[in-house]
Image: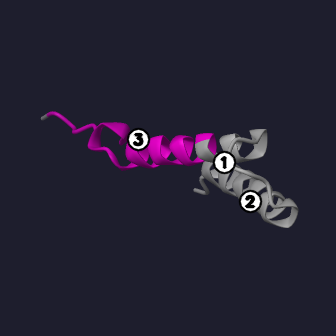
């Protein structure tokens, strides 16, 4: 299953980064601050997805 949340964040980050590079924006602009926030959200999402507790529990049949 595709991780649409991650893909959406990555897409927004790429667009913002391209705008910042094109315009030569400094670090304290709203666009650059949003990029930093997206990086944080992606890291949290990756950690949440890779943790063993994030996986649904496996149900075992009882005899």
Dot 1 alpha-carbon crowd within 10 angstroms: few under 14, some 14 to 19, many 20 or more: many
Measured in 3D between alpha carbons, the distance from the residue under mark 2 to the one under mark 1, in whole angstroms, is 7 Å
Labelled disc at residue 35: 1
Measured in 3D between alpha carbons, the distance from the residue under mark 3 to the one under mark 2, in whole angstroms, is 25 Å
Reading the image, the residue beneath label 2 is 17
Magenta segment: 37-62
Q: In the picture, residue 55 is in which quadrant?
A: top left
Labelled disc at residue 48: 3
Dot 2 alpha-carbon crowd within 10 angstroms: few under 14, some 14 to 19, many 20 or more: some
**Vertical position of residue 23 compared to residue 45: above or below:** below
Tell whether label 1 touches label 2 (CB within 8 Å). yes
Tell whether label 3 touches label 1 (CB within 8 Å). no
In front: label 3 or label 2: 2
Task: Tell me the SS state at disc 1.
Answer: helix
Return the x and y of residue 59 as percentages of the image width and height: 27, 37
Return the x and y of residue 19 as percentages of the image width and height: 84, 59
In front: label 1 or label 3: 1
> Horizontal placement of 38 versus 29: left or right?
left
């Amino acid at each position: 299953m595709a991780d649409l949340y991650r893909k959406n964040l990555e897409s927004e980050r790429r667009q913002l980064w391209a705008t910042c590079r094109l315009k030569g924006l400094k670090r304290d602009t709203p666009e650059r601050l949003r990029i930093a926030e997206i990086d944080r959200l992606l890291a949290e999402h990756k950690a949440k997805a890779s943790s063993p507790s994030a996986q649904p529990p496996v149900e075992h049949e009882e005899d």
